[in-house]
Amino acid sequence: QVQLVESGGGLVQAGGSLRLSCTASGSIISTNNMGWYRQAPGKERELVGGITSGGNTNYADSVKGRFTISRDNIKKAVHLQMNSLKPEDTAIYYCAVIRYGRPAYWGQGTQVTVSS
């Protein structure tokens, strides 16, 4: 059974930074494309960005230049570094294993709240 665990969420002031991590047992992170998504209250879940198994990244326009996704295959983790946070970044953030271009497995999510 695949279990993804996100951590690192919390409350931060606008302009601050947070680093989210997603870990899993086994090789599922190191051998798959991974994605970070978020869901704000009353809104649909949206893609924040992703990283391929080879390390290529892509980002939503709303976070480009502020957020960075990286992977650590030795520690079996993928990270989301979030800088220059804005109140509109407030959401529950999820990591996902991407297969055939779609999320196949989800973590439980971690809350990020950015105060103005």
Image (spheres, helix red, strand yellow):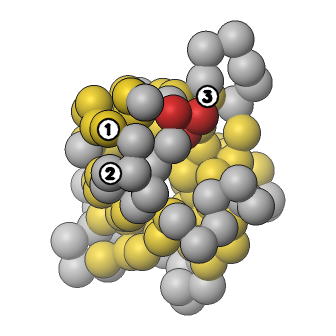
Residue assigned mark 3: 39
Circle 1 residues within 10 Å: few <14, some 14–19, many ≥20: some
- Picture layout, residue 67 above or below residue 18: below
Q: Nearer the viewer, mark 3 or mark 2?
A: 2
The image quarter in which residue 101 lies: bottom right
Dot 3 or dot 2, earlier in sequence: 2
Q: Are marks 1 and 2 in contact (CB under 8 Å)?
A: yes
The spot of residue 78 in percent (x, y) is 38, 64
Name the residue rendered at 42%, 74% in the picture.
70
Residue assigned mark 1: 13
Residue assigned mark 2: 16
- Picture layout, residue 100 above or below residue 7: below
- 60 relative to 49 in the view: left or right: right
- Picture layout, residue 53 above or below residue 101: below
Q: Secondary structure at mark 3?
A: strand
- Picture layout, residue 7 above or below residue 70: above
Q: Secondary structure at mark 2?
A: loop
Residue 16 shows in the view: yes
- 24 relative to 91 in the view: left or right: left
The image quarter in which residue 107 lies: top left
